[in-house]
Image: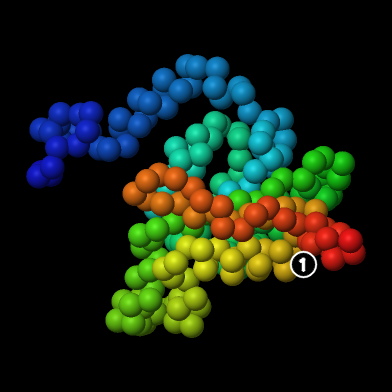
Amino acid sequence: MRAVARRGRPQNDTCMTDFDELIERNRDFAGTEAKNAVPDIPFIPTRQLYVMTCIDPRVDPANILGLELGDAIVARNVGGRVTTAMLQDLAWINYLHEVKTPHAEWFEIVVIHHTDCGSGFFADDDLRQGFASRGFDEKQLAELPVIVPSETLRVDVEKLLAYSNLSPAVRVSGYSYDIQTGLLTEVVRAESRDDRSSATKN
Ligand SMILES: [Zn+2]
């Protein structure tokens, strides 16, 4: 038995799991028109946004950005860091754009890192080494902690802009999310490689 009462269901109901309640919500959802208000081409979201952020449940883009179904592609991992796996997914979407919809408008990427991020535990030597001993690369883990979002955002935005599998037309920006205030702050203004090279020419 759980000591803490869960929101929205009786404490002594042992037959239901947390997910049963969500199945009911899914039935409600399926009964509405919301499922139909989605883009025709799934890799061209309604708002042409590709959001990269942390898996932390307090940083759900649907809530903090008020995203509707189909508005954005959302990629999440621990910290919202630009890792090899993140880059591969992005390269795939970029490739589909080039090959299947070459005349469509490009999406833009928004990277969001946040305060009080659990990825900070990777900076703890004991935790990082203990986890690495389960078969992970400690050097790579050591690059993951988000301690000061404005610093890691700059690193990751540069990494994206330097990525050869990303179209030079795609704009990338970086925002820090404050868990306490619920507010986003711009750290890196939206810019593409094309923007940079035309700025250099002028
Ligand atoms: Zn986090």
Expressed as whole percent of the image width and height from the top left, the position of residue 187 reads: 56, 58
Closest to the observer: 202 or 152?
202
> Which quarter of the rendering shows the N terminus?
top left
Q: Position of residue 104 (x, y in %)?
A: 82, 40
Q: Quadrant of residue 101?
A: top right
Label 1 neighbour load within 10 Å: few <14, some 14-19, many 20+ = few
Image quarter for residue 201? bottom right
Q: What's the residue at 47%, 16% (across, down)?
A: 31
Q: Measuring from the top left, give residue 28's x and y in whole percent.
A: 41, 20
Camera-side residue: 71 or 195?
195
Q: Is residue 187 visible?
A: yes
**Tag 1: residue type?**
Ser
Q: Residue at x 66, y 67 (%)?
A: 158
Look at 61% across and 35% down and name the residue there. 71
Element at label 1 = loop
- The image's colouring method is rainbow
Is 99 in front, or is 192?
Answer: 192
Drawn side of residue 113 relative to residue 20, left or right: right
Q: Which residue is mark 1?
A: 164
Q: Nearer the viewer, residue 11 or 171?
A: 171
Query: In the shown orientation, is residue 125 left or right of residue 157?
Result: left
- Identify the residue at horizontal 44%, vertical 67% (top origin): 148
Query: What x and y, as percent, mark residue 24?
Result: 35, 25
User: What is the quadrant of residue 44 in the picture?
Assistant: top right
Can residue 54 be seen here? The reply is: no
Q: Which part of the image, by quadrant, shows the C terminus?
A: bottom right
The response on whether ligand 1 sits within 8 Å of label 1 is no
